[in-house]
Image (spheres, rainbow, N blue to C red):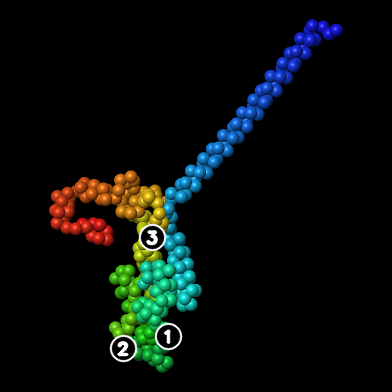
Amino acid sequence: MESEDDMHDANDSAEDDFYSGGEAGLAASDDGDADYDFADHDSDDSAELISHRQQQNYSILSEVDIQRRQEDDINRVSTVLSISKPEACVLLRNYNWSVSKVHDEWFADEERVRKVVGLPEKHNEMPNDREVTCGICFESCPRGSMSAAACGHPFCSTCWRGYISTAISDGPGCLMLRCPDPSCAAAVGQDMINSLAADDDKEKYGRYLRRSYIEDNRKTKWCPAPGCEYAVEFVMGSGSYDVNCNCSYGFCWNCTEEAHRPVDCATVSKWILKNSAESENMNWILANSKPCPKCKRP
């Protein structure tokens, strides 16, 4: 028979094994619970991320993004309509950079569209003489130093440069530049600007062109923060108009004031008017004027 000491040692060993196994089992159970909790947290985070993406119904555009989108639209119109890129650019400028609008109008009545935007169907050549008279300074110049739009009216490089420079100095209206001949409405494309204008004028023309892509489009606006060069493309469909630009400025897409959710834009506008420095003058304006139907300002 075994001694009492041996039996006692065996019982102690069995108890140790039992408790050791129990702790291991509990640890395993705890680890399993932790895994399930971790998976649940991952699921919650994914749901929040998806919800955030669905709520953000706008995109921030840098100058590079604007230029790339503009070039893509020009290439699309040029390819579909089988016209040159400068001609496609003229069409898009006249139809507020709406590719679908250009396609609809062009296929409905190409002849009318060409007449409206100043794109002759046939490119007329300059007189085939050694010397050609400029239509502005009336000097006889070698044919190689003369240039003409699609209409074929010849002008010397000096007069073209002065004509383009004056138009660009006058502002964004240079984007709708036409032939210098008073009786002609042929459009002057960007290709002629790049080949005839001075470097400063070409750079300024390019800025006007990029700005028109944002300002003439209903879906895009510039960030109203001072000095910010980002634009915002907004997609309708969400109840929120709050936009957070990459410059850290938050504003309302609808009224371009600082973000004011949940207060509506009309209330914010009234509050700003009421708290303006010239309150007395503003009271007179409110009593004796009407808001502009476009910008809603008095």
Q: Amino acid at mark 2?
A: Phe
Q: What residue sits 40% from the left and 51% below the top?
A: 238
Q: CA distance from mark 3 to mark 1?
A: 35 Å
Q: CA distance from mark 1 to mark 2?
A: 26 Å
**SS under mark 1:** loop
Q: What residue sits 66% from the left and 23% below the top?
A: 23
Task: Return the mark for residue 219.
Answer: 3
Local packing at callout 1 (Cα closer than 10 Å; few below 14, some 14-19, many 20+) is: few
Residue 199 x, y percent position in the rendering: 39, 71
Label located before the other in sequence (2 or 3):
2
Q: Is residue 11 left or right of residue 52?
A: right
Q: Is residue 49 left or right of residue 111?
A: right
The quarter of the picture where residue 6 lies is: top right
Q: Is residue 20 left or right of residue 264?
A: right
The quarter of the picture where residue 188 lies is: bottom left
1 vs 2, front mark: 1
Q: CA distance from mark 2 to mark 3?
A: 47 Å
Q: Amino acid at mark 1?
A: Lys
State whether residue 37 appears in this view.
yes
Quadrant in the picture for the C terminus? bottom left
Do the numbered discs 1 and 2 sit on residues whose CB atoms are within 8 Å?
no
Task: Return the mark for residue 281.
Answer: none
Local packing at callout 3 (Cα closer than 10 Å; few below 14, some 14-19, many 20+) is: few
Seen in the picture, residue 289 relative to 125 is either above or below; the reply is: above
Q: Which residue is mark 2?
A: 138
Do the numbered discs 3 and 1 sit on residues whose CB atoms are within 8 Å?
no
Label located before the other in sequence (1 or 2):
1
Q: Which residue is mark 1?
A: 122
Local packing at callout 2 (Cα closer than 10 Å; few below 14, some 14-19, many 20+) is: few
Seen in the picture, residue 5 relative to 166 is either above or below; the reply is: above
